[in-house]
């Protein structure tokens, strides 16, 4: 190593429960390797799980992070990896450095849903180098990216912020919020909807009028019926579970809009997965139960695989509409924790004794 390589560094990485924690654990070894390239030994990386809290005025409460840092003997850098989407001046905020507390807050959703491992690593390293070299030169860093820009504080003790543009950055943030909602893990919560949808969709296998109707409907019309069924179920889930958030003040209108967009897109993924599973189940059932000779007599033409697929598609559309009603009778299903808005409220009101906020060292 070069003679000017800085001495060792101790880093504490605190992450929100859920996806941020899994990402923190997955990249811990890589972070340690990168730090070993930039610092002399010893290099230490510790991880901890804790929920970043919000004050009533929506500002960040860093008291828990400071307390955890004391437990670890005041590490050189404390990194908070959160699922909170953050905006300042209408621009997505990727990271913010609080020099007085030696804390940097990194927003996972702002980094997007794809290739986030590398993006998170680069952002973490960028924050660490800025916090350990506060008076150093601000030349290009190998961890920097052209689509994000630091706004360095002019006054001592002021915050430095890392932003991205609103256009692509907004899209990236919404996709990141959808990933944080983990729609494929949420889909099994709709078990009652799937049961009702399967029961109703199964009628399409046994009722010949549905065979005839699906045969004479054009492909665009069938696709439109499927889209309308998915849209109807999404609307029902939003209304019946009160998933739509309203801003309490105009300054929060933009971030609440992002919350609602991510909720709709998350439900779209959930319901589309349910619809696809239903089409597959009905298709397999139809191929097994419906005799091609009998279908030929009913529809007056030679059946093909596409014929069976059309029947499954139309039957699934009927089933999804019934599934929306079925979901309202499932008292075990709680979709409100799906939304960022609800989880943000938990950050204000959840007691320390609740599982979601328990500190877990590693």
Image (tube, grey):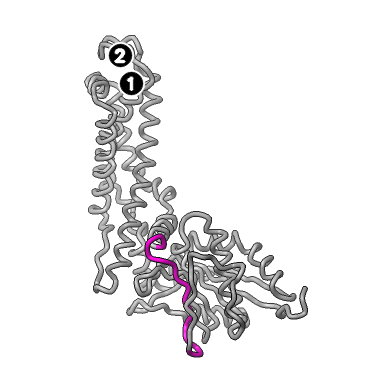
Number of other residues with Cα within 10 Å of mark 1, as a class: few under 14, some 14 to 19, many 20 or more? some
**Do callouts 1 and 2 mark residues in contact (Cβ within 8 Å)?**
yes
Label of residue 198 in the image: none
Residue 165 part of the magenta-drawn span: yes
Specify the quadrant that holds the C terminus. bottom right
* Residue 217, image x, y percentages: 24, 25
Residue 91 part of the magenta-drawn span: no
Q: Name the residue under label 1.
A: 307
Q: At 60% across and 86% down in the image, what residue appears?
A: 135
The Cα atoms of the two marked residues, 1 and 2, are separated by: 10 Å
83 or 346: which is nearer to us? 83
Placement of 211 over or under 178, stated as above or below: above
Q: For numbered disc 1, what is the local secondary structure?
A: helix
Mark found first going from the N terminus, 1 or 2? 2
Q: At 30% across and 51% down in the image, what residue appears?
A: 331
- Count the labels in the image: 2
Q: Mark 2 points at which residue?
A: 295
Placement of 166 over or under 289, stated as above or below: below
Residue range in magenta is 155-169
Q: At 25% across and 33% down in the image, what residue appears?
A: 318
Which one is closest to the eye, mark 1 or mark 2?
1
Q: For numbered disc 2, what is the local secondary structure?
A: helix
Q: In this view, does 153 lie to the left or right of 283?
A: right
Specify the quadrant that holds the N terminus. bottom right
* Residue 170, image x, y percentages: 38, 62
* Residue 340, image x, y percentages: 36, 62
Q: In this view, does 105 lie to the left or right of 289?
A: right
98 or 13: which is nearer to us? 98
Q: At 40% across and 45% down in the image, what residue appears?
A: 188
């Amino acid at each position: 190593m070069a003679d000017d390589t800085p001495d060792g560094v101790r880093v504490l990485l605190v992450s929100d429960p859920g996806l941020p924690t899994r990402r923190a654990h997955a990249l811990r070894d890589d972070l340690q390797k990168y730090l070993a390239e930039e610092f002399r030994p010893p290099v230490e990386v510790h991880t901890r799980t804790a929920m970043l809290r919000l004050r009533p005025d929506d500002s960040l409460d860093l008291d828990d992070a400071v307390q955890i840092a004391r437990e670890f003997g005041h590490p050189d850098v404390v990194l908070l990896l959160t699922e909170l989407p953050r905006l300042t001046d209408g621009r997505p905020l990727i990271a913010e450095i609080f020099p007085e507390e030696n804390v940097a807050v990194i927003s996972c959703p702002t980094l997007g849903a794809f290739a986030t491992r590398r993006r998170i690593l680069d952002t973490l390293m960028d924050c660490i180098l800025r916090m350990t070299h506060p008076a150093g030169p601000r030349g290009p860093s190998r961890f920097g990216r052209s689509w994000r820009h630091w706004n360095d504080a002019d006054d001592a003790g002021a915050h430095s912020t890392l932003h991205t543009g609103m256009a692509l950055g907004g899209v990236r943030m919404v996709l990141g919020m959808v990933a944080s909602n983990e729609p494929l893990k949420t889909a099994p919560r709709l078990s009652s909807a799937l049961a009702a949808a399967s029961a109703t969709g199964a009628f399409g296998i046994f009722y010949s009028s549905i065979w005839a109707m699906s045969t004479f409907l054009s492909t665009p019309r069938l696709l439109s019926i499927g889209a309308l069924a998915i849209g109807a179920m999404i609307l029902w889930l939003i209304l019946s579970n009160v998933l739509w958030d309203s801003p309490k003040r105009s300054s929060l209108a933009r971030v609440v809009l992002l919350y609602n967009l991510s909720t709709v897109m998350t439900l779209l993924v959930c319901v589309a997965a349910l619809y696809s599973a239903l089409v597959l189940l009905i298709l397999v059932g139809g191929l097994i139960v419906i005799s091609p000779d009998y279908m030929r007599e009913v529809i007056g033409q030679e059946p093909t695989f596409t014929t069976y697929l059309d029947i499954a598609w139309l039957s699934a559309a009927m089933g999804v509409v019934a599934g929306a009603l079925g979901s309202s009778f499932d008292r075990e299903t709680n979709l409100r924790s799906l939304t960022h808005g609800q989880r943000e409220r938990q950050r204000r009101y959840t007691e320390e004794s609740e599982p979601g906020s328990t500190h877990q060292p590693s």
